Amino acid sequence: MSATAGQADGAKSLADRLGIEPGMVVMEIGFDEDVDDDLRDLLLERVGEFVDEDTDEVVDAVLLWWRDGDGDLVDTLVDALSPLAENRVVWLLTPKAGRDGHVEPSEITESAPTAGLQQTSTMSVGKDWSGARLVAPRAAQKKR
């Protein structure tokens, strides 16, 4: 498939691929001026608004914009889990290779299990950003 064929699917297919549905409560962490505005606008159109990390609500998904130098990834992932509903997802959004703030994939693969998550997939979510889908391992979900 060519890049243009993927783009022809339209922007809504990205929201579908991320599993973001209308009515979901989505928490956003790490917003800054460098985030992908097209992705944010698409998702905001889908859910209406994001809640911030100070919310008391149970959330269906977390969008975590993360750059090299933002601090301790494990601590931030653990914090992101506390308001997350069972069987839900954290999308770890990081700058692509060659972009300012790029996070080495090894940091994600080492940090996720320490925080109690496993990485299930990665995908391009914009011109400058990649997304890693992180979920609680099935064994941990069954114990809850």
Image: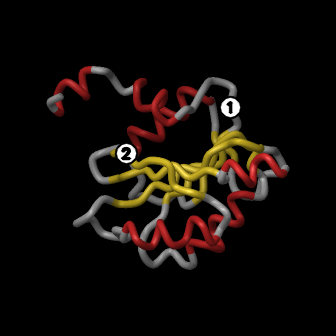
Q: Is residue 77 left or right of residue 123?
A: right
Residue 86 coordinates in the image, percent (x, y): 76, 44
Q: Nearer the viewer, residue 118 or 17?
A: 118
Residue mark closest to the camera, 1 vs 2:
2
Up-down relation of residue 7 to residue 127 (above or below): above
Instruction: Give the farthest residue toward the front.
Output: 139
Query: Which residue appears at 61% of the width and 72% of the height?
Result: 74
Residue 98 coordinates in the image, percent (x, y): 22, 66
How many residues crowd mark 1 within 10 Å: few (<14), some (14–19), many (20+)? some
Q: Which residue is mark 2?
A: 123
Q: Is residue 69 left or right of residue 135?
A: left
Q: Is residue 105 left or right of residue 84?
A: left
Give me the C-alpha separation between circle 1 and circle 2: 21 Å
Q: Nearer the viewer, residue 143 or 10?
A: 143
Question: Element type at marker 1?
Answer: loop
Q: Looking at numbered disc 1 in the image, what kind of residue is underneath it?
A: Met
Q: Which residue is mark 1?
A: 24
Any mark on residue 33, and which? none
Query: Which residue appears at 37% of the width and 52% of the height?
Result: 130
Up-down relation of residue 144 to residue 16 (above or below): below
Q: Looking at numbered disc 2 in the image, what kind of residue is underneath it?
A: Met
Query: Which residue appears at 71% of the width and 42% of the height?
Result: 87
**Image coloring type:** secondary structure
Up-down relation of residue 26 to residue 56 (above or below): above
Query: Which residue appears at 48% of the width and 64% of the height?
Result: 66
Q: Nearer the viewer, residue 132 or 22?
A: 132
Q: Give yes or no for contact between labels 1 and 2 (Cβ–Cβ under 8 Å).
A: no
Quarter of the image where one finds residue 1: top left
Up-down relation of residue 84 to residue 110 (above or below): above
Residue 26 coordinates in the image, percent (x, y): 65, 41
Residue 131 coordinates in the image, percent (x, y): 43, 50
Of labels 1 and 2, earlier in sequence is 1
